[in-house]
Amino acid sequence: MLNNLEDPVQTPAQALKNALILAITAKTDERSKECVEMAKGFAHACSDETVDRIKKEIEEMISRSRFKECEDCAGVGWVETEYARPQGFDRDIGCLDTRRVDCETCHGNGEVEIEDE
Ligand SMILES: [Zn+2]
């Protein structure tokens, strides 16, 4: 989130965006409230459309930051798994083969939702 901060801040819209990001990422409720108050002040200096646009940007940022690359499949959504091919008419001995299956951890999405701590 913090890498989305506007720097340098030149417009009230950028200041508003920064205040909202800081409010979301604040470590304590108190700090978060301070940032929300700051954001309200900046919002007064912005047009309604600008405030709406910033809100959308922030929402997108939040939804993106809730997901991370799946560690089990390295973000591709599938894993190679070994399965045993039994001995049969066309094979003298059983052997192991590999096939691709949907990653169980991320259900083939390649990313998993970050759980709240
Ligand atoms: Zn996965």
Image (spheres, rainbow, N blue to C red):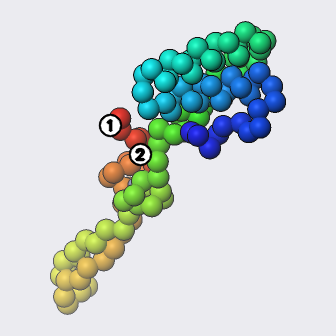
Q: Answer whether residue 56 is visible to the viewer in this image.
A: no
Q: Which amino acid does label 2 sit on?
A: Val
The reply to whether the C-beta atoms of the residues labelled 1 and 2 are less than 8 Å apart is no
From this view, report whether residue 62 is shown above or below residue 55. below
Q: How many labels does the image show?
A: 2
Q: Residue at 49% across / 23% down in the picture?
A: 32
Disc 2 residue lies near ligand 1 with CB under 8 A: yes
Residue under pointer 2: 112
Q: Answer whether residue 85 is visible to the viewer in this image.
A: yes
The residue nearer to you, when weighing 109 against 96, is 109
Residue 8, quarter of picture:
top right
Q: Earlier in the sequence, mark 1 or mark 2?
A: 2
Side of 11 where 51 appears, left or right? left
Residue 116: x percent and y percent? 35, 35
Residue 50: x percent and y percent? 76, 18
Q: Which of marks 1 and 2 is in front?
A: 1
Quadrant of the rendering where the N terminus is positioned: top right
The residue nearer to you, when weighing 104 against 50, is 50
Q: What residue type is labelled 1?
A: Glu
Q: Residue at 51% across / 40% down in the picture?
A: 65
From this view, report whether residue 33 is shown above or below residue 70. above
